[in-house]
Amino acid sequence: MEKHDNTNSPALKSENFDDTLSCSEFASTASFYSEETPLREGSLETTIKVESLVEQLDDYECSTLDSLNARWPSIRARLKGMKPHLPKKADDKPTLVLDLDETLLHTYRDVNAGHSEPDYIIYASENTNQIITAGTLRPGVKKFLKWASEIFEVVVWTAGDDDYAATVMNILDADRQYISHVLGRSACIQTRVGSNGECMYVKDLCALGRDLSRTFMVDNAPHAATLNLSNLIPIEAYYGETTDHELEQLQQFLESKLTHRKDMRIILHRQFNLKRKLRQRINDWKHAGVSLTFQPR
């Protein structure tokens, strides 16, 4: 078990990057309500269980997706004039964006709540026993990161705050051998949903300054990628299960399907058709008579 303190955790620095990328060409296809060019459904097999993930979306998740997609033009408009979050790449590797919590690890605050032995504990400072959080690493995560770094530019992007992201990176990749960039909540687009105006954080790949045809995101929460569903590889949420094999299966999928593709969105559409499946799930949810009132920002 690793012990880390949160004192003087390096915050993410704001740098002046060249604003060379325009996402206007992608704006008309961001929402899963938009029309899309039909592609022949492939007969590809995968262990990634998209159908079950979509079917398991509860009422709150459906309402969140519906609200976010109904307002995606105004959400994306906030990017206008902003600098890309990442510097220009030094090589031609595709970009792999990985979520953090429930994708690469599982964190919790109560170490006595019946969880398995934590892999790490983060303390408020070096000289205190006050625990901020503890957690377990997803089985095979370090092996996966090592493999991925040889083929992709690896970016970890979390909706957690920036200091938390930097601290956890010292656990996952202390020497920065495998993870090229780390982004936290400040790089997300904040919007509000629900009658109480709950904050939601959306990760827009357009803000990275990368070619979207060679960029994709792995995340357990579809709403986080609502502006880039054609670039999303969904993954089962991880809550500390020792028998979890999702990263091993993800590696097999990436090796067989994406490492040599010019436009990764085509193969992801054929494989998952996530826009259509989410659209159908939202329609089914609406027809079931479930209704929530949303508070505009």
Image: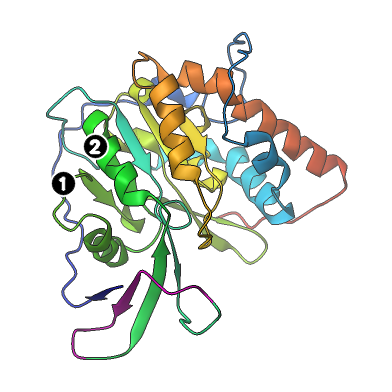
Residue 151 versus residue 241: which sits nearer the camera?
A: 241
Give the image location of residue 263, x and y in percent: 39, 15
How many dots with numbers?
Answer: 2
49 relative to 197, above or below: above
Q: Residue at x 27, y 57 (%)?
A: 172
Magenta stretch: dominant secondary structure: loop
First along the sequence among labels 1 and 2: 2
The answer to whether 240 appears left or right of 147 in the picture is: right
Write down the quadrant of residue 137 in the picture.
bottom left
**Tag 1 and tag 2, C-beta contact below 8 Å:** yes
Q: Residue at x 19, y 90 (%)?
A: 127
Residue 241 versus residue 195: which sits nearer the camera?
A: 241
The residue identified by callout 2 is 149
Give the image location of residue 26, x and y in percent: 44, 23
Magenta residues span 115-127
57 relative to 130, above or below: above
Q: Residues within 10 Å of mark 2 (few under 14, many from 20)?
A: some
Give the image location of residue 107, x and y in percent: 44, 68
Tag 1 secondary structure = loop
The answer to whether 169 appears left or right of 59 in the picture is: left
Where the C terminus falls, by quadrant? bottom right
Residue 191 versus residue 94: which sits nearer the camera?
A: 94
Marks 1 and 2, Cα distance to the nearest angstrom?
8 Å
Q: Residue at x 46, y 28 (%)?
A: 253
The residue identified by callout 1 is 177
Tell me which amino acid carries mark 2.
Ser
